[in-house]
Image: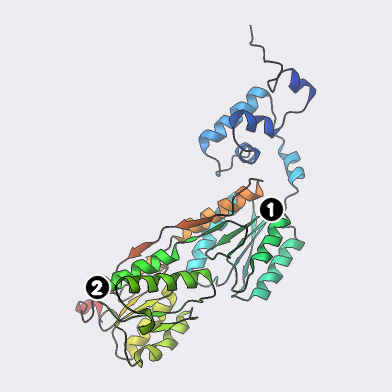
Amino acid sequence: MSARRGAGEPGGDEARTRRLTLGDIAEQLGISTATVSLALRDSPLVAEDTRRRVKETAHRIGYIYNRSAASLRTARTQIVGVAVHDILNPYFAEIFSALEDVLEAEGQMVFICNHRDDVARQRAFIDMLLQHRADGLILCPSVGTSAEEINRLVEQGIPVTLVCREVPGAHAPCVRGDDAKGAHTVTRHLIEQGHRKIAMVGGRRASSTGRDRHGGWRRALEEAGLDPERQIDIPELMTQADGRAVVPQVLDHADRPTAVMCFNDLIALGMMPELRRRGVEPGRDMAVTGYDDIDGAASRTPALTTVRNHPDEIGRLAAWTLLRQIAGEQVPDTLILIEPDLRVRDSSPPPGVRLAPELSR
């Protein structure tokens, strides 16, 4: 003798008079309809146990998931745009590789824009995405991007996730490293090594990344009783070529630093051979640190002390956050910070400490 469902239970008398929906499953399990939809599509965004419970409930109440109808209802194009300011930077290449893996596994085709911090170029790319009815956008915003621009997209129902840089007032989630903490940590390392003249080189201060790393450097100096205003502070530089070009300015300063905290690894890797060419051995005559821990940072001579910002984790989390939005989930416009790690290597000894001969060749 089979059990009889109650009249009000989905699958009972009520189910005979109306079509079952995702909402019926969601209500029974206490989860969102977006999560139910993802679970029925076997999305890795949903925990395996939740996927199992959703499918069991769907089977029990007699719900049949129609993939073709779902596709027609959502009218998705399976296109996602990704815009960053420097795809040639290995750090952003790592982020892109990680997020692309997640998006492609979910059937999304990825369009990429290297906007080079040109806000007009970024706007043209976003207009193209809108014309192609893209499902969403992952954006490392150009300097000059306003909250109003991002909020207009959100108000039009375009899922947007910011990555690496945030825009104050933007109603979109943002995934990035804790740049203030990372810069504070590496500066404190130099101070603990005995350095008191610590230059900061690089970073666009109009971006949140530039502001936060600069702020972390300043805070570490102030906590140690050192005046940031008396240190060398050279903004705006970003590339390896910039690192080479800035060396004379650093060396010719009346109060030459014993250590340089570079905004990123590219600047540091540009500075080190140029310092050596001018008779200043990096990691011996001057400590040099970077930021990002890009491929090759550990294999240089000297191996570069830097901050690992976990670009693979940032990329995956940004992709998952966008996919949740595309699925219809209400994702709060929160800031998601990834904890950075200091990687101490040979380029940041105390002042006047010489490397072993094999490291200083």
Q: Is residue 324 above or below residue 28?
A: below
**Amino acid identity at mark 1:** Gln
Q: Nearer the viewer, residue 148 or 119?
A: 148
* Residue located at (52% from left, 39% from top): 47
The label shown at residue 247 is none
Query: Left or right of 188: which side holds 40?
Result: right
Q: Residue at x 37, y 68 (%)?
A: 184
Question: Is label 1 in contact with label 2 (beta carbons under 8 Å)?
Answer: no
Residue bearing the label numbered 1: 78
- Residue under label 2, please give it: 193
**Residue, x 68% and y 75% (percent of image)?**
120
User: Residue 254: percent from the left, percent from the top?
Assistant: 33, 93
Q: 93 or 283: which is nearer to us?
A: 283
The local secondary structure at tag 2 comes to loop
Q: Position of residue 70 (x, y in %)?
A: 73, 41
**Residue 286 x, y percent position in the rendering:** 29, 82
Q: Badge 2, how many Cα within 10 Å: few under 14, some, many 20+?
A: some
Image quadrant for the C terminus? Answer: bottom left
Q: Nearer the viewer, mark 1 or mark 2?
A: 2
In the image, 345 versus 27, the foreground residue is 27
Look at label 2 and name its amino acid.
Answer: Gln
Name the quadrant containing residue 356: bottom left
Of the pair 49 and 202, the residue shown nearer to us: 202
Mark 1 element type: loop
Rounded to the nearest angstrom, the CA distance separating label 1 from label 2 is: 52 Å
Check the image and name the residue furthest to the top: 1
| Residue 230 visible here | yes
Q: Is residue 14 left or right of residue 289?
A: right
Say whether disc 1 or disc 2 marks the residue closer to the N-terminus.
1
Say which residue appears at 71% left-offset and 71% top-offset: 124
